Image (tube, coloured by chain):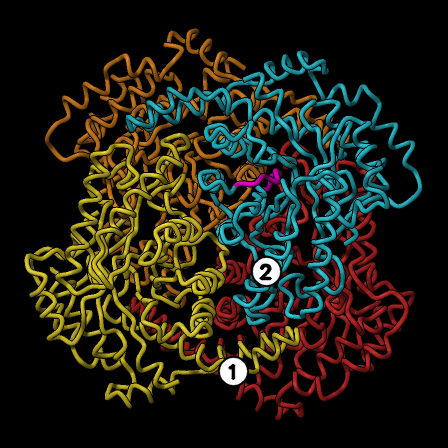
Chain colours: A red, B orange, C yellow, D cyan
């Protein structure tokens, strides 16, 4: 169990170190990075404190640089790797009615070109994963043909798949709604799954925990995708209402535990095939410590899942003993795993309390003092 | 257009003529059928008034009879056919923890035997469709293994598929929740679709309009399943909250129209492949006229969908003209199609106002007077 | 803190010891009580194991007896008291269109008479609380006048209030939906609150944790009602979807903690004014141990709420330190309070592990053996 | 009926003529106003086409001008009035943790000062209504004290009320969530109502149709507030998921009809006391014609509500005839009122088809050509 926890890898997203907000307001914060290099410094800080966040996902064009090899080398110096590449086909005026699903073939071609550019960037960054999210959809009934848009989507996905290098894969993310308000072109896991089955190996589904209808049982989806070999990874975050992008585990820690339980049970924790990524927005809280907290929350949920007495659980399930089976699961959940994780950190040569260590380090004050002037990174919406 | 409307076939469910209710109370009504024969009389009455409800779905064991040939002949005399067969594997104490997904192999075997019995009944009734809904699921986290239950489900579905006669098919229905409260074994279209793809031809998805998470875009699912040849049919009803089973079109008539629009657009209206079935509970309102109203509501939505100016719509969609495309759709929806449908009924030799004709016929009073004594049909919960 | 936990009082509901189910099926269980006396034995068993469940709520007519003094004495012998009286105005055919909101004055009069009968029963049972829940509502738009029904409701509530004895109070429960599907006459806390304000002292709102729209922040409602002196009590249970009536704390233990946090913070834990009642349905699990588990879950949530470092929390809140304030709360939630509660039980002369003690006691086997024949108690739907 | 429709007044919001979007992207459009004067031109255009949109709501500071008398005079020249004043206390960095509920007294004072400034602006613009929406809330459990924030809110509301001039009133808007993700300080009508009752006359609730939990019955809230004299007005718009701010009536036209039915039934249509205001975002569609369509949608819903046969409805409701009562309502809804409204427009000297007339007028092309350069109006998020 300790070994499993020490070798866990949770990828943090570069964009969560920049400013973010709602459509009503982006509150600027002190010390926010101005470029991809500074984002990588923040990501490295999270890894330095937690020991389990050794890579950072990039978003293109927000993290575009002239020389990706230099960026990669810089990350390497700071002890982390460059992770998934996330293309952006939703922030140019051309994409008002969609990107790869747009009724205009010229816009579709432009969007596809950007996706293929990202495939090339993967070779330079050493990324193995292309993480695809499409903001495509409709705001009004009748606005466009739902099935025609599916066909256009399939066409683009095939084109991307055919260009992926060896050992590379694409993950297709789904989202219930937002920014489209009537129909989203990949609204649920079923749609993403249907496309991934048709695309064959190299295409898998990405589960963002905030992208579901109210009441959706996410661990069921996780279990089903795992059983079909089609779970590519996660975007962890938490939500009370819509896609709130709060710190992972903050809104419903029990749900996060149930998800990690399905992963552990399927033996998918160690398997490099499932990418554990965070995708969050720290709109009002300081970003680096919020990211540390999120990593810890995923780690704690995982530790609890590893504590589940699998034999006792299976026995109770086989016997149809509802209360005992539930109690076995809850016993693990109710255990305080923080002492164990502190011990593991000590084993790894880390401070047992990453948040306190971060504050003692003065990192937050240093970046606030140093990162003055220039344009703070943000979404550019 | 008139031809399409005259040839539409909407199947009514035998169980909706019996008593139903909530877990709090089943309110008995006058004139409710006591057996399958009387249910068929009521179904025939709905067809006699509307002209577009020429078949009735059966539920086994609620509609079990000694001689299905006799039942079929009786239906034929009254001008209707026997439709889909609906097995029941949720109302015996053995099914407390599920039927085909139950951890106990003996219960699974019993459930499968009932499914296969229903396959045999299909041969006697002349039914072409086996309509499968499983109440299987979990009430508590940990209660059973989610992936193990999927495997058991797949095993049962294969066994049923292998026994289906030529020209027969099975429809797999999904449901978001209820009666299971934590996890349902077929909770969404994606799960039903995954199984149907694995089962191959002869297995298709059944969409019950009341079985979705809040906010789900049902017409998207319809369009996607149609594009993959996996839409087997509908259980139409309407809901404000959960699976309310109100009259079709009563809660959100615009949604029903958007669904029929996708059907018409895909050319699936005439195609015998998509079964238009109702599945409702008339808990507080008289059942036969409520069923007539439901049939009319589906018919009106269909008529509006047929009114959509397809060329104007495609043009506006191609040009990215959001407001015009939406306006073309809304123009059809806002049209009052009742005069047209009255005309069609007159053409078919029917009274133009089915509800008024029903009331004038005295049928309701006759069954209230005649169906006295005996046990009223109901769900037997 | 230990004192607060030892003096906590959680009331269990008589009906949860009887059979219950969904509209699809009520699964009978072994050992289920046949009458109110046997229900009280089960409730006493829960108190004997947990030490914090010293009263049982009654439901009339399900618990109707000829001599309430005898019932009260029997409870006393077993160490518990009779608690809230819950009238039933939803299970007679007359109530098809509502009870106190029914358009028919005769039905309204009948419903009111039952409510007043329950007020009289309170005097015999020594109950101080009348717990009102109305299933009244509409299934279809237009079915009845929404404001006229509000007026009828207000009239009945005034009549009940005027008859309450000294030291007695009425609690008005709200429910989002079910059994009504289009409009419920008391659908939310705002409606209950408006009536209670108009009724004055002696009328308070009852919060059933399962009776809210998806995503509703229940602790906000609790805090607001507490600040206005209008929180009368709780019906604790848990849910993933609708009114699932699962064991309290089973679906979202963090939510239960947040609720108890608001109670503790408002100093309302010891205050007799807020009634902590359970309202659950154990459809598939054995009822007595499920009730024990539910009591423990409420107790654990309360213990965690008592652990919150109020000073540290206030300081961080005052300073606008989002992450620290959240961390203070989470620190309490993440603590394993089971050892502390075991200690408290030992102090109280109880077995530290109530569930294990229950199983060792043989109570479950005894009632299964003894309670054979007769009609098992249930909802009678 | 014609008179009622001719005298209907629907207020359009100045901000809906500017650019808007989601947190992902604001798509700029051609011809968007650069200042309050140009917004008023657009609002006047909507009134010129529809005849029922004679006023425009202002948002401060987005519509701040040096001389409000001049703005008012300009509006008068164009045939419209200045309507409700909407303060903005959510778009400065100081408001990161709230405005009038902020833990920092200095921020609260600043927010209050802005509210009082808006009260003064009302005197200059001749506005009778102050429309209050607070973005205040919490993103994380524990972040701040829920009841303390309620107290701070109440304090600010009292201060504003005390400063309102004679004949002026304040409307308090509630919102389920966004931009706060864990707890919103005025999340539902009950909270707004509780404050308005405490504030007394001059404070009423504002219902924004997009600000509710999934499944909420809005017409129930409308009926209840009307019965208590506490419905101040509407922000009409429509939504499928969250606060989508789509054109009124676009997502669920039947719901809009049910709302107008309650208004008509309560005799509140003509009553100047209920303000019919739109609040929308035209993110992807051209703004002026989208606003015309929205006005028409509200007008059509109102016309249908006026068509309801009130006597037949009351009779069926009294008799408990569920199907007839529903049918009476649906008969009005299913009627095509567009010919009637075209006639009314002709009576009023308007083009019977406002959208077509708008396109023929060349207004859209003119503003696209003229409004070049300068900064387009937007939300400034």
For the record, the magenta segment spans D231-240
How far apart are the alpha carbons under marks 1 and 2? 26 Å
Quarter of the picture containing the C terminus of chain A is bottom right
Residue C263 in the image: state x and y as whole percent: 43, 71
Q: Residues within 10 Å of mark 2 (few under 14, many from 20)?
A: many
Whether residue D170 is situated above or below residue B17 in the rendered picture:
below
Residue C198 in the image: state x and y as whole percent: 38, 50
- Determine the residue positioned at 64% across, 26% down: D296
Same chain for the residues at labels 1 and 2, yes or no? no
Instruction: Find residue C309 and name its label.
Output: 1
Q: Residues within 10 Å of mark 1 (few under 14, many from 20)?
A: few
Instruction: Find residue D153 and name its label.
Output: 2
Most foreground residue, D98 or A37: D98
Q: Quadrant of residue D205?
A: top right
Regarding residue A85, the answer to whether it shows in the image is no
User: Could you say whether the residue bearing mark 1 is in a helix, strand or loop?
Assistant: loop
Residue D270 as seen in the image, left or right of residue C182: right
The verdict on residue A64 being magenta is no
| Magenta span: chief secondary structure | strand
The verdict on residue D238 being magenta is yes
- Determine the residue positioned at 18% across, 66% down: C82
Whether residue A369 is situated above or below residue B214 in the rendered picture:
below
């Amino acid at each position: 169990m300790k070994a499993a926890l020490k070798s866990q890898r949770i990828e943090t997203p570069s964009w969560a170190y920049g400013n973010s907000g709602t459509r009503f307001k982006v509150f600027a914060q002190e010390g926010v990075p101005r470029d991809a290099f500074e984002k990588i410094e923040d990501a490295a800080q999270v890894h330095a404190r937690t020991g389990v966040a050794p890579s950072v996902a990039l978003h293109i064009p927000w993290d575009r640089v002239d020389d990706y090899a230099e960026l990669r080398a810089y990350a390497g110096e700071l002890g982390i790797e460059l992770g998934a590449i996330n293309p952006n086909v939703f922030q140019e005026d051309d994409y008002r009615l969609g990107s790869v699903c747009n009724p205009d073939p010229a816009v579709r071609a432009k969007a596809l070109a950007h996706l293929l550019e990202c495939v090339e960037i993967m070779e330079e960054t050493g990324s193995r994963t292309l993480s695809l999210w499409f903001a495509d959809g409709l705001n009004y009934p009748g606005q466009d043909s739902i099935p025609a848009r599916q066909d256009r989507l399939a066409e683009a996905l095939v084109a991307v798949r055919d260009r992926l290098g060896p050992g590379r894969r694409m993950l297709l993310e789904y989202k219930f709604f937002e920014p489209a308000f009537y129909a989203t072109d990949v609204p649920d896991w079923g749609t993403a799954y249907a496309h991934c089955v048709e695309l064959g190996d190299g295409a898998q589904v990405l589960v963002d925990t905030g992208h579901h209808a109210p009441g959706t049982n996410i661990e069921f989806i996780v279990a089903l995708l795992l059983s079909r070999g089609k779970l590519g990874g996660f975007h962890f975050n938490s939500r009370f209402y819509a896609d709130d992008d709060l710190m992972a585990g903050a809104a419903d820690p029990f749900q996060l535990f149930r998800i990690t339980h399905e992963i552990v049970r399927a033996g998918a924790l160690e398997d490099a095939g499932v990418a554990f990524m965070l995708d969050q927005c720290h709109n009002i809280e300081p970003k680096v410590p919020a990211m540390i907290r999120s990593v810890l929350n995923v780690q704690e949920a995982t530790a609890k899942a590893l504590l589940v007495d699998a034999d006792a659980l299976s026995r109770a399930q086989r016997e149809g003993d509802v209360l005992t089976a539930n109690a076995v699961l809850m016993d693990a959940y109710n255990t305080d795993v923080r002492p164990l994780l502190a011990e593991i950190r000590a084993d790894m040569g880390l401070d047992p309390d990453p948040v306190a260590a971060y504050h003692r380090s003065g990192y937050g004050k240093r970046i606030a003092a140093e990162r003055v002037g220039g344009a703070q990174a943000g979404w550019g919406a």
